[in-house]
Structures are given as C-alpha cells and as structure tokens.
Image (cartoon, grey):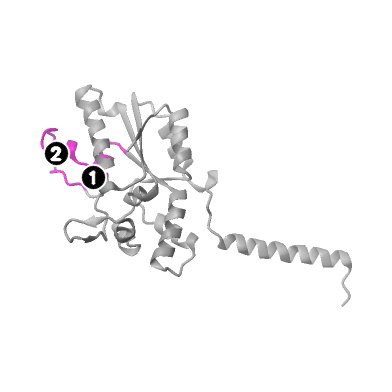
C-alpha cells in the first residue's frame, strides 16, 4: 500500500510521541508539581495563627539530637515564657540523612538505613534496623516537666507530634536517598519505584513536600516562622 508523505510524517510523529511517553513514565519524578502533593495542608501550616512559629532545619541524624532542641524550645516557651501550648507551632523540616527519621521500622529494615547512614542501635551494638526515634518513651500520665519520664521531656517523634509538632519530609531528598541506596546496596530497582515504596512507609502524620529548602523559604517569607538550624 502506498503511503502519502503527509500520512508518513503523521505516523512517524505519533510513533515518536509514543516512545517519548514511555520513556518519561520510566524516569524518576525528580520534581513534584502542585497537584502531586497535599499543598492545602502545608498552606494551613504557613498561615497558622499561632503566636510563636518556629521551623527547625535538620539535615543530619546525629543520634536524634535535633529532637531535643525542639523539646527544649517547647518547654522554654510554654513554662519559662508562659505561652500557652495552643499558641505554639513547631515544624521539624527534615532533609538529607535526617529525613530517614520520618520513616517506619519496615523502611529502616528493608533499606538498611542504619548501615547506610551509620546509625547504631544501642540495644544491639549493630546498625539500626528500626526507627530508634519514633516511639514515645514517656510514662503515661506523667505531666511533671521536671520528671525525665514525663511527656515534657519526651524527645521521640511520637511524643513531639502529641505536642503539635509537624514533621515534614522532602521528596527531593527521597530521590537522592533512593539513588544512594541503589548504588550502595546494589539494588536492582528503578529509582522512581523505590521512592514510591519509601514514601508509602512514612510515619503517621508526616507531610511530604516537594523541596524542603523551598518549603522553608515559604514558611519564613509568608508564614513568618523563626528559623533554627539544628
């Protein structure tokens, strides 16, 4: 069958478009667009009416010491300055290796975070295969801020969430982490597939944002959050 030049060009263009579409679906989604994440939830944080708003920028795990910084700020404001807890909004902006704190035990075990990011489990003396920083260690019902086992001295993610702290996870950091895991653990998986699996293992209440450095800029510029690097 003879094909006209016009038909040939049209079919060739359609074939190229199909190939391009297949290639783009296989590539990692390095950049999130507005519709890819829960922007409305983030926007509510930006425009919170709390009297004191503070964002903690954490990039390293450092045995979870940044969690202690958040706890100390909450206690200083609530007890030392007598600002009601309802008037405090703290945000833990985690990216880089610190972002691993946002994931559950199954992620830590499957992707060997302890081994890759040099986080040791004090109970075993081996690289952690569980999230050491999530579960609350506070004694239930203890409200004395001077007791080490009270909710006010609890530096766990769960405990701080109970006091209104919002934990943010960075999609860009997850993309970078996935690439590192694939390289160091010799994984035979596409990066985008790994990222999706990883993000499905986020801790309850964690909010995924497209880019943490961009999110922090908006929290400061539009939300007037005080910035603290930890």
Query: Separation of disc 1 and disc 2 at Cα?
Result: 12 Å
Please provide percent x and percent y for residue 80: 20, 23
Q: How many marks?
A: 2
Give 54 or 5, whichever is nearer the viewer: 54
Q: Is residue 10 left or right of residue 153?
A: right
Range drawn in magenta: 136-165
Q: Is residue 100 left or right of residue 1?
A: left
Q: In the rendered view, would you say 77 is above or below 163? A: above
Quarter of the image for the N terminus: give it.
bottom right
Q: Secondary structure at mark 1?
A: loop
Q: Secondary structure at mark 2?
A: loop
The local crowd at label 1, few if under 14, some if 14 to 19, many if 20 or more residues have their Cα within 10 Å, is many
**What residue would you read off at disc 2?**
150
The disc label shown at residue 156, or none: 1
Q: Residue at x 61, y 63 (%)?
A: 23
Circle 1/circle 2 CB separation < 8 Å: no
Please provide percent x and percent y for residue 72: 23, 33
Q: In the rendered view, would you say 100 is above or below 110? A: above
């Amino acid at each position: 069958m003879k094909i006209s030049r016009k038909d040939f060009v049209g079919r060739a263009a359609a074939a190229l478009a199909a190939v391009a579409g297949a290639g783009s679906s296989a590539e990692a989604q390095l950049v999130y667009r507005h519709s890819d994440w829960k922007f409305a939830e983030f926007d509510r944080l930006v425009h919170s009416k709390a009297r004191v708003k503070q964002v903690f920028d954490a990039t390293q795990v450092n045995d979870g010491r940044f969690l202690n910084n958040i706890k100390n700020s909450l206690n200083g404001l609530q007890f030392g300055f007598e600002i009601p807890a309802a008037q405090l909004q703290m945000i833990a902006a985690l990216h880089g290796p610190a972002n691993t704190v946002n994931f559950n035990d199954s992620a830590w075990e499957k992707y060997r975070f302890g081994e890759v990011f040099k986080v040791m489990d004090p109970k075993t003396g081996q690289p952690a295969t569980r999230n050491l920083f999530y579960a609350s260690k506070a004694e239930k019902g203890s409200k004395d801020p001077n007791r080490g086992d009270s909710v006010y001295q609890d530096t766990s993610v769960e405990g701080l969430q109970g006091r209104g702290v919002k934990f943010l996870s960075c999609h860009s950091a997850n993309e970078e982490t996935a690439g590192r895991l694939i390289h160091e653990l010799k994984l035979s998986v596409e990066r985008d597939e790994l990222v999706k699996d990883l993000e499905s293992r986020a801790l309850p209440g964690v909010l995924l944002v497209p880019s943490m450095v961009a999110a922090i800029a908006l929290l400061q510029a539009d939300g007037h959050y005080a910035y603290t690097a930890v």
